Amino acid sequence: MRFDIITVLPELLESPLNHSIMQRAKDKGLLEVHLHQLRDYATGKHRQVDDYQFGGGAGMVMKPEPISACISKLCAERTYDEIIYTTPDGQMLDQALCNRLSMKQNVLILCGHYKGVDDRIRQKYVTLEVSIGDYVLSGGELAAAVIVDSVGRLIPGVLNDETSALFDSFQDNLLAPPVYTRPADWNGMKVPEVLLSGHEKNIEEWRHEQSIERTKTRRPDLLEKSGDGY
Ligand code: 6GU
């Protein structure tokens, strides 16, 4: 899978995508991430990418021409399955959307900045608008990093058995159960007996019960989505 990301701040995206599972996915040739500095597509002495908004009001707006130049160039090189714009008024990113995106080949992400992009860019190019939560970030870069990480780890072959996504929180609209490692007795705090029993069926049942219990107390809204009637 290939991500192309258009941004005025590529530096913000470098570190989060160059470590751990993302780095391994790239090393294995399963994930490619290409960053494009929007300013390189701006013209004039100041390579200006933003301008005042028509109608007045505080805050700058991203100009359409540099974005259009960059998107046109990339679209001439390959076909994009999705052109995503990161914006607080977009569709909320959840595991279902991550799963859906992980099946795409080429995804282009345009990082919003300032007051946002000129709306004509959204109308002309953008196929999906994504928000990562009901709060405002200073720019779309961190949101883009969240999208690449949460989607990239789902690409087949990226995770191994130990890190398998199958048992992640949200995969079945349930939160993950609690986990423990050695020592079995830590300052008198004991690991639940069943986990030491070696009895696979009981362990599986216990984990499922814990998942349901956690979801009931922490995220009852998810249970309505799960359709299992807990
Ligand atoms: Cl995608 N962008 C910005 N600027 N803020 C956000 C967001 C995106 N998602 C949540 N807050």
Image: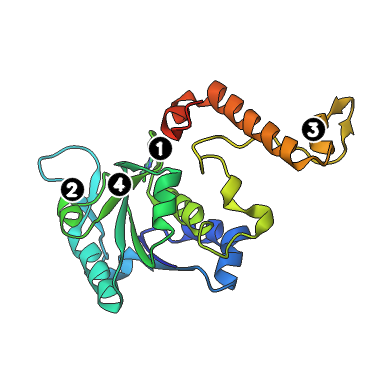
- Could you say which is closer to the camera, residue 16 or residue 76? 76
**Quarter occupied by the N terminus:** bottom left
Three-letter amino acid code of the residue under disc 4? Tyr
Mark with earlier residue (1, 3): 1
Q: How far apart are marks 4 and 3 (CA)?
A: 53 Å
Mark closest to the chain's N terminus, 4 or 3: 4
Does the rendering let one see residue 191? no
Report helix, strand or loop for mark 3: helix
Q: Earlier in the sequence, mark 2 or mark 3?
A: 2
Q: Front-most of 227 and 188?
A: 227
Q: Quadrant of residue 197?
A: top right
The image shows residue 131 at horizontal and vertical percentages of 36, 43
Task: State the mark number for residue 52.
Answer: 2
Dot 2 or dot 4, earlier in sequence = 2
Task: Check disc 3 and report the residue beneath it.
Answer: 194
Q: Which amino acid type corresponds to the residue marked 2 in the rendered image?
A: Tyr
Give the x, y percent position of residue 158.
57, 63
Q: Which of marks 2 and 3 is in front?
A: 3
Q: Nearer the viewer, mark 1 or mark 3?
A: 3
Residue lying farthest top? Answer: 217
- Between tags 1 and 2, which lies in front? 1
Distance, label 1 to label 2, CA atoms, is 27 Å
Q: Is residue 25 left or right of residue 145?
A: right
Q: Which of marks 1 and 2 is nearer the N terminus?
A: 2
User: How far is mark 2 from mark 4, CA to CA?
Assistant: 11 Å
Label 1 – label 4 distance at C-alpha: 18 Å
In the image, which disc is placed on residue 133?
Answer: 1
Say what secondary structure mark 4 lies in.
loop
